[in-house]
Amino acid sequence: MTRRLINRHPSAGSALILGALPFILLALAYVFFSATRLADNPDDKLLPAVSQMVDTAVRMATQPDQRSGNVLLWADTYASLKRLFLGLSVSTLVALVAGVAIGLVPYVRAWVAPVVGVISLVPPMAILPILFITFGLDELSKVMLIIIGITPFMIRDMAARVAEMPSELLIKAQTLGASTWQIVTRVIVPQILPRLFDSLRLQLGTAWLFLISAEAIAATEGLGYRIFLVRRYLAMDVILPYVAWITLLAFLMDFGLRKLNTTAFPWLTRRAG
Amino acid sequence: MSLVVENVWKEYGDQTVLERLNFEVPTGEFCALVGPSGCGKTTFLRMLLAMEQPTRGKILLDGKPLPEEPGPDRGIVFQRYSVFPHLTVLENVMLGLEFERSPLVTRFFGAERRRAMGEARSCIASVGLEHAIEKYPAELSGGMQQRLAIAQTLVRRPKILLLDEPFGALDPGTKAQMHDLLLKLWQEEGMTVFMITHDLSEGFHLATRVLSFDKVRRDPQAPNAYGATIVYDLPLDDKEQRKPIIERWRHQLAERQSQFVRAGI
Ligand SMILES: Nc1ncnc2c1ncn2[C@@H]1O[C@H](COP(=O)(O)OP(=O)(O)OP(=O)(O)O)[C@@H](O)[C@H]1O
Ligand SMILES: [Mg+2]
């Protein structure tokens, strides 16, 4: 008896192989095309050999730069992550406070929700020049771009999650004698935190996008700055490892937030059984 | 608490859900609310909670107008979403005490915490959940969740207990257990109970009075024009438990009468 396609599941082993296959194919394709191009022209810059990329990456991660005296990879990573974390922390905090207030308090909803809705439609990149003009070319404008880029969506997401909580729970809390403050701190926030981390996770990609854009336009260090700087020399041996490094960092953040949700909120995953 | 419902109507737009509700319920009465689906039983409970306001008429609790928002004097067990999914059984029951006694941090520490835990534990034991004290609601069966909801409601000792089809999803055995439990708690606490049920035998078994909702007027052209009202109000006077309730009620009525007389009305 054959089963429908939707009912056939790969075993754990074959799932692993299936998942790894695209990575292996990509790597093989890269090695193959890089080798053929280098055979034609040993000075080709577009697809540098893997060995060359490893050499460059090791150099960037261990040896100080002649001009600045910094080890570039770490200096860039530190600068970028600082901006990113600053922006993400502010956004998350604002989204939590504003989202709960909008979702729970009718007066705040009437007052704030329309303006947040409109602001969330302004393309952040279009106001980047305004940010540079008002906040200057240094750190603040880059952090502000991240904040402006992701906060309105996170606020709307949080407000929607609060508003869609079963009204029975709010009524129930009131029949147990809870004040608004007690409802916020004991009923709403604890249940909304995992949603907040989920929302943050989904905004990570966007945050990176704004960070790299801002760094590409005006910065003196940072992962995005470096990539756009060496682009002038077609230094693919720097760009590709940097892209891989950024991807790894993004993956680790995503993974960390997911782990946080499953360990910090046991009630989310436990089921009768 | 005694309840007076005076010519109460509830309309949503041009749909009349409930109309001409008139009755009095003495303190300690156990009312079963029955009637066809969609006739407005839940709407009536929601008005008692002040989640909804009547569009006409008024509801009096102990002679005073119903408060305009839900409060700890009226406890509710919903059919679903009655317990907090992010709290364990113990925390769910403790929460009511924390709301009451710790307005700012809503948490207990030290001796106060131990005392509250003792209270919550005995409340949990009275519904037979002491073995599941550390579990989250998602780890409980439907019957256990309803028992938790009852314990959580009772820890604040409400004067009125509202139950919306609390045992609809339970098997007959668990249901019978829950009936015994509910009757015991009702006797001990002296609450006034309103319980919606679709199971007539359950209603007659538990209650001291059965209120049956239905439409008396129908317009085939406009099915929403008329609402449901109370078509049968059946006091179960042959029940032993009803006698003291009525006795007390008579006493109160007589007292009210003599007050009026003294006031010269
Ligand atoms: N917020 C609302 N807005 C509009 N109509 C409503 C609203 N709440 C309830 N109704 C209507 O009121 C009527 C009665 O609903 P209610 O939930 O009170 O019925 P019920 O007697 O509890 O039914 P059931 O036994 O199926 O639970 C329904 O026709 C419903 O459509
Ligand atoms: Mg109902």
Image (tube, coloured by chain):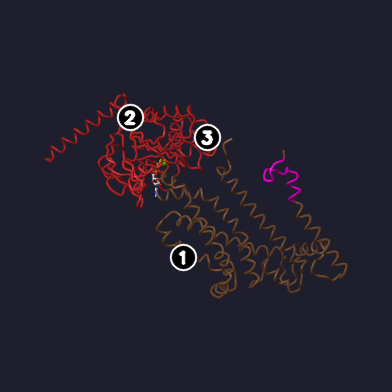
Chain colours: A brown, B red
Secondary structure mainly formed by the magenta segment: helix
How many marks can you see? 3
Decide if residue A120 is on the left or right side of residue A247.
left
Q: Which mark is residue A115?
A: 1
Q: Residues within 10 Å of mark 3 (few under 14, many from 20)?
A: some
Q: Residues within 10 Å of mark 2 (few under 14, many from 20)?
A: many
Please report the bounds of the magenta region as a residue range. Answer: A2-19
Say which of B187 and B133 sits in front: B187
Is residue A3 a member of the stretch shown in magenta? yes
Decide if residue A102 is on the left or right side of residue B231.
right
Q: Amino acid at mark 1?
A: Val
Say which of A269 and B224 sits in front: B224
Q: Whole-Å distance between the Cαs marked 2 and 3?
A: 30 Å
Label 3: chain letter: B
Secondary element type, mark 2:
loop
What is the residue that sits farthest to the left in this orientation? B264
Reply above or below: A134 against B1: below
Q: Amino acid at mark 2?
A: Thr
N-term-proximal mark, 2 vs 3: 3
Secondary element type, mark 3:
loop
